[in-house]
Image: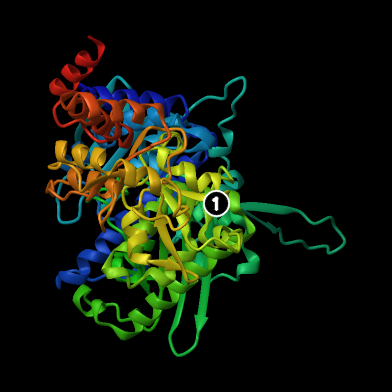
């Protein structure tokens, strides 16, 4: 039969599968078991809304059939099955657009994979099989079809005879190589071990014919006991959900396997939180704090939420009401026998029990993050680099109503420590004479290091927090203070550490110079004055109002393009040689003073990372100075 070619990206991804994307090939069985369980779940979901369907749990199972002689492994399920079109959609196109690019970017470091992340788990079969055959009959259909592929050369689909609804996957297991043995995937004990390891908690029976030994009947009791073997179908998974097991029975590997099996992420979790509550409201939960953000995390496509179960039965795939937005990165599930199976999404939003569970979960996440921050700072920094921006948005959103919950979780780069520090770290090191928590905002740490505005604060020996994300200043503006210490930008009009006598005489003597300069750029700045903060730099911009220069940049870059300007003040270092040129120009050539003023203003804009309003005029002014 003619074969259909895989699309280019699908073909390349399949090549990756064949050449083993996983370091442990055995996880192909985990993926197939998860798919089979999902297929049965789909019938259950359909039965909830279709009165013509009844869901009898005893009718649903997964069967594993190894055949050593023919080197085949069959995984069958009694799930919803697939039509021909669904075979084309689900098996003919591997992954979604961009998966290969993502693989190239991540390079699959530390064993990270893209199979669970992009829904291509079925194709992990090609790591262990030379040929994969899928025979499926969809619920409500009279026809069955067979999909078959030997790898990158394509696949075929043809009608096939199958009596029962469900799917059979038949793998032609590879021959052993010099370095790799595939016999475990045909061995009864080996398969049982893999299933117990990865899929023990799947709530449908995973059945397999198992060899059982029993003693033969003997006439003489003194004769040596002889045994006979026979095959007996057994359920090889416990079907006890991991969240109902005793924590002491579980290892980190068990939680990591659960995380991978549920496809919560393509990474390994940084931390798991296992909750068992047996009081007026009874529930179990397993939560995970991921190591890295999914590719779509900071996009509108990302959907937060925990899986919600009622007495072991999934009733909602993503219950957003269980997590506040600022903890939306948390993955996991909640199971409560107090919730009704038939509860609707609308009812859940107003359910008092669910709100109590959500509050408890929020507090549990916060306390665990605090513990991680205190006891494992390296892991916490990894977490914060991935999700710190979300915490800052949490401080800013909802008019700051969550700031008390989140302020202790924030971290910023420190000018003195040269690493991320907490606000508590900063305050604990403040000298007695320091009144404010000082910060500087900019695009990068390197650019902030070079800001003229930091000179005076740094010379005083005060630590400066570096704000490099657009949300930072907005969050701090909402926070206002920490441990009764107010925040102050190094670019603010008054740092409260300047010597009031500094430059007072020079400013008074040269007030006419500053007035003439202000007149030259009156449409651009609020004021021009002598600086009390500059030491080596000739000029800088500071802000005199609520909106800082960094805020102005952020607001201008927003989709709505808000035209909000900071009240800019041009500060001049009267001890710099440039000021002598300004004085001379004021005395002898007013046109030159205007030229110098515009050049200094544009220089200050460039230092701040702001665009020069008229680049042509700026370059012409530069040429005038050179002539």
Q: Is residue 151 left or right of residue 361?
A: left
Residue positioned 47% across, 61% down in the render:
436
Which one is in front, 477 or 365?
477
Decide which of 112, 38 is in the foreground and name it.
112
Where residue 511 appears, as percent x and y from the top left, is: 27, 44
**Going by the image, does 24 lie left or right of 92?**
right
Give x and y (percent) for residue 251.
62, 58
Q: Residue at x 31, y 48 (%)?
A: 470
**421 sits left or right of 351 in the view:** right
Q: Quick one: which residue is furthest to the top in this view?
A: 627
* Residue 99 in picture, x, y percent from top left: 31, 33
* Residue 264 can be seen, yes or no: no
Residue extending farthest bottom: 280
- In the image, residue 552 above or below residue 334: above
Residue 516 drawn above or below residue 268: above
Q: Is residue 602 left or right of residue 324?
A: left
Identify the residue position indicated by label 1 in the image: 462
In this rendered view, identify the residue nearer to me: 275 or 416: 416
Task: Decide which of 222, 614 is in the foreground and name it.
Answer: 614
Dot 1 lies on which element? loop
* Residue 14 appears in the picture as rendered: yes
Residue 615, position in %: x, y? Answer: 16, 24
């Amino acid at each position: 039969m003619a074969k259909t070619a895989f699309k280019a990206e699908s073909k390349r991804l399949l090549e990756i599968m064949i050449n083993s994307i996983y370091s442990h090939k055995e996880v192909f069985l985990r993926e197939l078991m998860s798919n089979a369980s999902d297929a049965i779940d789909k019938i259950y979901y359909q039965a909830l809304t279709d009165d013509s369907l009844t869901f009898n749990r005893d009718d649903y199972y997964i069967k594993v059939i190894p055949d050593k002689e023919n080197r085949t492994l069959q995984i069958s399920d009694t799930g919803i099955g697939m039509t021909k079109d669904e075979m084309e959609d689900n098996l003919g196109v591997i992954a979604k657009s961009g998966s290969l690019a993502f693989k190239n970017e991540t390079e699959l470091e530390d064993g990270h994979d893209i199979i669970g992340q992009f829904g291509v788990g079925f194709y992990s079969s090609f790591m262990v099989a030379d040929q994969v055959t899928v025979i499926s009959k969809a619920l409500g259909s009279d026809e069955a079809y067979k999909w078959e592929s030997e790898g990158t050369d394509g696949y075929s689909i043809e009608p096939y005879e199958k009596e029962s609804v469900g799917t059979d996957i038949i793998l032609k297991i590879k021959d052993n190589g010099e370095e790799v043995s595939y016999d475990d995937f045909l061995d009864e004990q080996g398969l049982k071990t893999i299933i117990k390891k990865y899929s023990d908690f799947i709530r449908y029976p995973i059945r397999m014919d198992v060899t059982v030994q029993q003693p033969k009947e003997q006439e003489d009791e003194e004769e040596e006991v002889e045994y006979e073997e026979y095959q007996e179908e057994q359920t090889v998974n416990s079907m006890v959900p991991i969240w109902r097991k005793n924590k002491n029975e579980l290892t980190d590997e068990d939680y990591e396997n659960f995380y991978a099996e549920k496809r919560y992420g393509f990474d390994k979790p940084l931390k798991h939180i296992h909750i068992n509550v047996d009081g007026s409201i009874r529930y179990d939960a397993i939560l995970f704090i991921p190591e890295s953000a999914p590719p779509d995390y900071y996009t509108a496509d990302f959907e937060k939420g925990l899986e919600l179960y009622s007495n072991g039965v999934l009733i909602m795939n993503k219950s957003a009401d269980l997590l506040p937005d600022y903890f939306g990165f948390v993955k996991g599930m909640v199971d409560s026998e107090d919730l009704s199976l038939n509860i609707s999404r609308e009812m859940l939003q107003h359910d008092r029990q669910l709100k109590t569970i959500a509050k408890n979960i929020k507090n549990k996440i916060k306390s665990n993050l605090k513990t991680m921050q205190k006891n494992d700072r390296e892991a916490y920094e990894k977490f914060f680099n991935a999700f710190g921006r979300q915490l800052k948005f949490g401080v800013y959103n909802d008019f700051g109503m969550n700031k008390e919950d989140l302020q202790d979780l924030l971290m910023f780069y420190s000018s003195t420590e040269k690493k991320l520090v907490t606000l508590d770290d900063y305050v604990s090191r403040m000298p007695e004479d320091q009144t404010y928590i000082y910060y500087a905002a900019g695009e990068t740490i390197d650019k902030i290091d070079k800001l003229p505005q930091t000179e005076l604060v740094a010379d005083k020996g005060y630590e400066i927090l570096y704000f490099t994300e657009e949300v930072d200043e907005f969050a701090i503006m909402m926070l206002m203070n920490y441990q009764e210490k107010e925040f102050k930008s190094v670019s603010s009009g008054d740092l409260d550490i300047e010597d009031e006598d500094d430059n007072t005489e020079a400013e008074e003597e040269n007030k006419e110079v500053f007035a003439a300069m202000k007149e030259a750029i009156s449409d651009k700045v609020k004021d021009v004055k002598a600086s009390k903060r500059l030491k080596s730099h000739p000029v800088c911009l500071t802000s005199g109002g609520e909106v800082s220069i960094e805020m102005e940049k952020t607001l201008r870059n927003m989709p709505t393009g808000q035209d909000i300007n900071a009240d800019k003040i041009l500060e001049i270092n009267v001890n710099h040689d440039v000021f002598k040129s300004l004085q001379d120009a004021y005395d002898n050539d007013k046109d030159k003073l205007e030229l110098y003023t515009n050049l200094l203003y544009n220089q200050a804009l460039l230092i701040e990372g702001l665009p020069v309003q008229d680049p042509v005029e700026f370059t012409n002014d530069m040429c005038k100075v050179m002539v």
